[in-house]
Image (cartoon, rainbow, N blue to C red):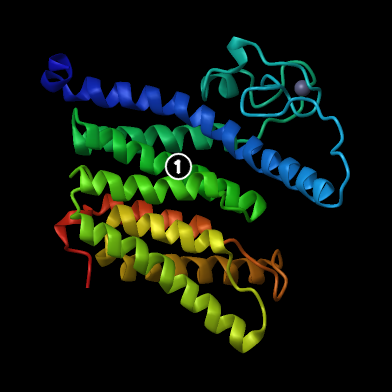
Amino acid sequence: MELFQTYPLLWILLAALVGLLIGSFVNLLVWRLPQMMQNDWADEVLRFQGQEPPARDMFNLFLPRSHCPSCKTSLGASELVPVLSFLWLKARCRHCQARVSWRYPLVELAVAAWWAWSAAQGGVSTSALAWAGFGTVLLALAFIDADTMLLPDVLTQPLIWSGLILSALGLTGLSLSDSLWGAVAGYLSLWLVHAVFKMITGKQGMGEGDFKLLAALGAWLGWMALPVLLLIASLLGVMVALFMRWRGSLQAGEPLPFGPYLVFAGLLCAMADLHSGLIYF
Ligand SMILES: [Zn+2]
């Protein structure tokens, strides 16, 4: 540890490398978690109807082993190196030449950058690790929401609790009461928007996952951050929606996930030195 205190750059580099590996896991999570949830729901519906769910091959975060989605060949160690494998194999599967999405290395790099930033800001500390974890879960949520319009409870709920607990332990730089009111205000503000929208239009404008995600952001960033955060997320969402309408890739009335914008704004607020109070009000 002393070594890292003497050479902070070494610490940042280590964080970036760990971030790359974690990013690789985030790719797995983004791909598999929604499928696991959908399998569970399908089984649940059948059981509710009094039927036995069909036998299914084991499917969880660890099984089956990572494989090419096109040819199903299991990937070897040399094909699982974050970013480098992608570059080395020129974005193609070694076995069937199917294209590999550029999103995989992008997610790995984004998580690595976030880990490096946390290490640079927090130094050798528990709170640096906490912020690294915060960003990692948020990035996973953003991509899952973008893909499937889901914000899984197994990710949003622990993020709320961990924000509150870490604030109580003095690791987020927030008082417990700022953190607690952040969670409450985060949840209620979007719930209110949702309730009013539903009353006026009779339509579902937002999912419950969004309320929990903003509650988590409130728990980690404090209630003070919420007005700016919501403003950034909404403006960004509106801009992207207008751009997509203009390009013709979004139909009128077609829903857009709000999670990615909340995540982007949340990360931005975390970066803008959350506790200086400069950017709020
Ligand atoms: Zn293949």
Left or right: 21 with respect to 150?
A: left
Q: What is the quadrant of residue 129 in the picture? A: top left
Compared to residue 1, the image places residue 143 above or below, namely below
The one nearer the camera, 279 or 60, is 60
Q: Position of residue 260 (x, y in %)?
A: 51, 55
Can residue 117 be seen by looking at this rendering? no
Q: Position of residue 183 (x, y in %)?
A: 35, 61
The quarter of the picture where the C terminus appears is bottom left
Q: Position of residue 62 (x, y in %)?
A: 62, 23
Q: Identify the residue at image location x=34%, y=34%.
A: 115
Left or right: 176 with respect to 116?
A: left
Q: Identify the residue at image location x=52%, y=28%.
A: 24
Left or right: 232 with respect to 178?
A: right
Q: Identify the residue at image location x=31%, y=21%.
A: 14
Q: Position of residue 241 (x, y in %)?
A: 59, 69
Specify whether tag 1 is near ligand 1 (CB below 8 Å).
no
* Residue sticking out furthest to the top: 77
Q: What is the quadrant of residue 250 in the picture? A: bottom right
The one nearer the camera, 147 or 186, is 186
Can residue 196 be seen by looking at this rendering? yes
The one nearer the camera, 246 or 25, is 25
- Determine the quadrant in which ligand 1 lies: top right
The quarter of the picture where the N terminus appears is top left
Compared to residue 136, the image places residue 82 above or below, namely above
Q: Which residue is mark 1?
A: 137
Residue type at mark 1: give it. Answer: Val
* Residue sticking out furthest to the bottom: 200
The one nearer the camera, 80 or 57, is 57
Q: What is the quadrant of residue 72 in the picture? A: top right
Q: Identify the residue at image location x=36%, y=65%.
A: 184
Q: Residues within 10 Å of mark 1 (few under 14, many from 20)?
A: some
Left or right: 154 with respect to 74?
A: left
